[in-house]
Image (spheres, rainbow, N blue to C red):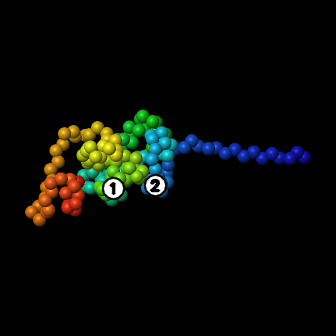
Amino acid sequence: MLPALLLTITLVAPPGPPEPGEVMVHAGERWTGDLDSIVERGFIRVLTVHNPLFFTFDGAEQRGLANDIAREFDKHLAKQIGQARSPTVVLIPVARDKLLTGLVEGRGDIAMGNLTITPERSKIIDFASPLYPDINELVVTGPAASKVSSFDDLVLSGLPST
């Protein structure tokens, strides 16, 4: 009798989009990389601010401008990169003061919010073309509020800013 030869074949499927639970496990980790490495990782994190117009939840459903823009971005990536390789777009709501610091610290890959492009901010991050150029901002306070003459005054006053 001849000895039997056992042959095991393991089929490895090409990497596809990560499972939703897997994305959420890794979404909060500090990480930086270029688009090629984002595609390899399988998801792109978009930091945004939670507010009724830009991003909110209706039950478990995400709503708002950031959600709409993220879905269009998802379609664009699928068209440019290919549906099978396109990274999943994940919206991560953060406090407004954590939007840019989260980006710099590697907690997100894109920051999406109603931000004014300032020389100070341009030194630390790159901006896309603005949706609305030449915007003037106006600070509105009440009689009990402290005097606000600059953005620094506004920050120091503790008044909410959007």
User: What separation in Å lies between label 1 and label 2 (alpha carbons)?
Assistant: 15 Å
Look at the image and tell me whether residue 20 can be seen.
no
With respect to residue 145, does 30 lie above or below? above
Residue under label 1, please give it.
98
**Quadrant housing the C terminus:** bottom left
Determine the residue positioned at 48% across, 39% down.
36
Q: Which residue is mark 2?
A: 29
148 left or right of 21 in image = left
List the single residue furthest toward the right. 1
The foreground one among 148 and 2 is 148
Horizontal and vertical percent for residue 161?
Answer: 22, 56
Label 1: how many residues lie within 10 Å, few (<14), some (14-19) or many (20+)? some
Contact, mark 1 vs mark 2 (Cβ under 8 Å)? no
Q: Of 99 and 87, which appears nearest the observer?
A: 99
Q: In the drawing, does residue 137 fall left or right of residue 14? A: left
Label 1 sits on what residue type?
Lys
Q: Nearer the viewer, residue 80 or 9?
A: 80
Q: Secondary structure at mark 2?
A: loop
**Where is residue 104 shown, x and y percent of the image?**
38, 50
Which residue is outermost to the top? 80
